[in-house]
Image (cartoon, rainbow, N blue to C red):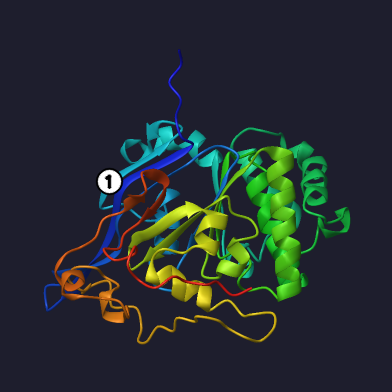
Amino acid sequence: MPVMYSLLAIDHLKTWFPVRRGLFSRVAGHVRAVDGVSMSMEKGKTVGLVGESGCGKSTLARTIVGLEKATGGAIHFNGQNILSMSAHAMKPVRRNLQMVFQDPFSSLNPRMNVMDIITEGMVEHGMIRRRERKTEAVRLLQDVGMGPHALHRYPHEFSGGQRQRISIARALSLQPQLIICDEAVSALDVSIQAQVINLLMDLRDRHGLSYLFISHDLSVVRHIADTILVMYLGGIVEQGPAQAVIDTPLHPYTRALISAIPSMDGQSKNRLILHGDVPSPSHPPSGCRFHPRCPYATEQCAKQEPILTAENGDKQRQVACFHYTTIPPFQTTR
């Protein structure tokens, strides 16, 4: 019987950046951008990763695709630990692991036209010949709702939403298994956000794609994700099925993120407001990293670090909080 692997499985991943000081640039400490993250996702699923700016979401994404070097842990893609692979062995893996960035303007080469941008990878990987570029580019543009008139134009000639569609077409060109969307709609107008989200969902269904969808906005993630992971100061504090996390958040930080979602009727119930900023990842608090901002923190929270624990034995629903069973019930706003 063949062994079944998760598409992506991350085990205690750490990405630390050295802080250098003094005349000889000696290492005086580390910025713990990603500090012991574990997660997994299956083929054809969408995992939403949410958290405030500075919590480590983008660093995690960049580490997965190899743009940042991991300090420790493992990243298994299709059962292979890609952190131990050589650059040559990684080339076919990179084809199956693509990324859509937050700012499409800075991620698109301004000196290349659209046809060259979205077919460059296909030529590099030997998927098509140069004379086939136009046909493939037209097909990819149609896939993302754009016409052939865009082929010979340059990135500065398009709107933000159109540039993001071009970025998605470029990611699709290599026929990947997993696309990481790093704040892919946060820079767009709300109406354009909805169009791009619907496009991503349609492409997922048509091509059998998997997404790691990163955002600070739970109101966006709830529409596309099957599972939600909540990240705070380099670690995962809650995870579970998307609807369960939205309807019955267990961690106080998740409650605060949901409280920040605007209410359609202008009213809010049981709103949890956080005070202060995210602590520095170079000097994280002792114990639970959220305790300096948590209204329910106790002395135990300041001394001991909670680990992700399954709620009622359900491994899909986990939370890192000592007191999630005793804090007052939370009523979400709609």
Please state if 98 lies on the left or on the right of 252 as rendered: right
Please state if 329 lies on the left or on the right of 30 as rendered: right
The residue pinned by badge 1 equals 73
Q: Residues within 10 Å of mark 1 (few under 14, many from 20)?
A: some
Quadrant assignment for the C terminus = bottom right
- Is any part of residue 52 visible from this angle? no
Residue 55 position within the rendered picture, expressed as x and y whole percent measured from the top left: 38, 69
- Picture residue at 50% right of the left edge, 41% below the top: 94
- Residue reaching furthest to the top: 1
Quadrant assignment for the N terminus = top left
Residue 77 position within the rendered picture, expressed as x and y whole percent measured from the top left: 44, 37
Residue 277, picture quadrant: bottom left
Residue closest to the eye, 161 or 208: 208
Residue closest to the eye, 89 or 264: 264
- Picture residue at 44% right of the left edge, 70% below the top: 329
Residue closest to the eye, 222 or 325: 325
- Picture residue at 65% right of the left edge, 59% below the top: 223
- Is any part of residue 205 visible from this angle? yes
Residue 64 position within the rendered picture, expressed as x and y whole percent measured from the top left: 42, 49
> Across the whole image, how many numbered discs are drawn on residues?
1
Please state if 140 lies on the left or on the right of 9 as rendered: right
Instruction: Say what secondary structure mark 1 lies in.
Output: strand
Asked if 72 appears above or below 277 in the picture, the reply is: above
Residue 43 position within the rendered picture, expressed as x and y whole percent measured from the top left: 56, 37
Residue 236, picture quadrant: bottom left
Amino acid type, label 1: Gly
Asked if 47 appears above or below 55 in the picture, the reply is: above
Residue closest to the eye, 290 or 190: 290
